[in-house]
Each structure stands twice: as C-alpha cells, then as structure tokens.
Image (spheres, rainbow, N blue to C red):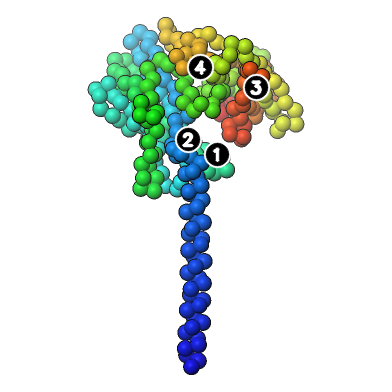
Amino acid sequence: MKKYFYLLISLIILSCNTEDDFIEDKKEDIAIDDILLKNSNPVKLTKAWTTYSSYRGYESYVRKFTVKVANLAYDKTVSIYHQKIDGNWDQIPLAYNQSVDNGQNEIWFGEYSLSGYGVNQVYADAFVVRYDVNGTTYWDNNNGSDYKMSRTEGFFFADSNINVSVDTDFVGLSYSAYDDQNRFNITVDVRNLDPNKEVGVVYSSDGWKTQKYLPLIYRQFWSNGPFYTIQSPNNFGIERWQGYTLLSASDDQLEYAIVYRVNGKEYWDNNYGENYMVNVNSNN
C-alpha cells in the first residue's frame, strides 16, 4: 500500500512541475505576441540616403539604409534587396546598431559605397527590406510599390514619425591649434513641415550640469562634389541645416540632442532617449 501511495505523490509532483513549465513557455509566447501586435509589420525602413559625385573621371556612389525591426529573437538577419542596373536583385546586408524601446525593437544600419576611375553604377532606383527571424521572412516593400531613390536624392524619411534626424557622418569635434579651441560642427535634416521653423542643438560638456543652445542655419544647397548638389528641400521634402561653434579646448567630449520647432510643436532627435556623444577629433 505504501508503494501505491508514494507513486501517487510522485505523479502529483510531476504534474505540478509540467504545468509550471508550460506556464513559463506560455509567458514567452505571449511576450513575442505582444511585440508582434505592437508591430503590425515587424520590419520598417526608417530612413535612407543616396548621393553621387564625379570629378575629372573619379566617381563616387553612396547609399545608406537605417531599418527598425521588432526584436523577435536573438538570431536574425536584416538586409536590403536592391535592384541592379541589369534588372537583377542584389543583397546588401545590414548590421545591428542599437536596442531601443526597452529592448522591444532594434535599429540596423548598412552602407554601400563604390568609388574610383571608370567605375560603373551598379544599382538602379528600387529596393525593399527583408527580415529573417524564427524561420519566417518579413518584408517592407513600401506597401507593394517598392522604395525608389535616384543616385542624388540625399535623405528620405520613410517613417512618418521622423521629422528631424542628425547626420552623424557630418558631426565632429576637432581641435584648432590656431584658435586653441575646439570646434563643434553639426549637420541635421528636417522634414519641411512649414517655411517658418527653428532648428537647433542642445549640448553639454559636463553631464548636463549646464547646457548650451546652438541655432542652426538652413542650407539651400548641399555640395556633394564639384557640380553635384542636393537642393533643399529635396524631392522628399527634406531640408538640410548646419552650424558650428567654438568651445574651450578642455571641452573634449559633448553630449547633445536636436530640437526642431515648427507650427507650435517641438520634435526631437535624442538618439531614442540616449542622446548623442561626440569626442574630440572623432565622429560619434
């Protein structure tokens, strides 16, 4: 009789453990389902950049892509599938950049560049985004229309929620021996929501114990090389703003964020709440 009693107790304990394990697995499924619900399409192009320049036979092509994906699993791949001049499609792999939204989403970035004498254009205008995760492939193909950018477009904001974005490729903090000061240069793109607007950068060199404000200046043209310029606003309604200021030579690191004031509203680019950082003689 004792044998049957212990067998019954063991079955009850085993049953409880199995139920607990099932609940834990279910919690993980619910978390992923929640992410999918908040991201009806778990992959989205946020912005892209294209430029071309040529000087005395030396040509340069640049394309850059920023994509936001739902963090559905650790192992994943994100790519741009780009149409080529010959009509075929080519893969441009993107790389992980940062985690955002409390880890629910990730930013992925990639760049293609080709330069030299006698080089030929490789890519046409059309491209889409591909996201492979958990054995499933998700696409952002601009609602079936594909994304299209010519070789001299400048910036395109694919995400309608983006109205201002710093171009970190054109941000720098450099020491000038002539002035014995550091020079802070910054370039920003904004969506042209109204002709009357203000764009500026808020920055600090002491961990926000104090802060300063630098108003930026509208650039009607952006030189991309001799005889090649991007008009501002461009074909996508994006404007380029720039500015610089001289700082103490001891200010060798800055933390900053961008503010765009228009139509009584403020829009910020603060690197998803993390702010941007630039060090002397280096980019972000």
* Above or below for 70 versus 208: below
Q: CA distance from mark 2 to mark 3?
A: 25 Å
Q: If you read the primary sequence from the N terminus, does the residue marked by circle 2 or circle 3 appear first?
A: 2
The residue identified by callout 4 is 238
Query: Outermost residue, bottom direction?
Result: 1
Q: CA distance from mark 2 to mark 1?
A: 9 Å
What is the x, y in percent for residue 146? 36, 26
Q: Is residue 232 left or right of residue 244?
A: left
**Closer-to-camera residue (252/124):** 124
Q: Are marks 2 and 3 in contact (CB under 8 Å)?
A: no
The residues tagged by marks 3 and 4 sit, at their Cα atoms, a distance apart of: 18 Å
| Residue drawn where x is 38% and y is 9% of the image | 55
Q: Are marks 2 and 1 in contact (CB under 8 Å)?
A: yes
Element on which disc 2 rests? strand
Extreme residue toward the right, this view: 209
Q: Which mark is residue 265?
A: 3
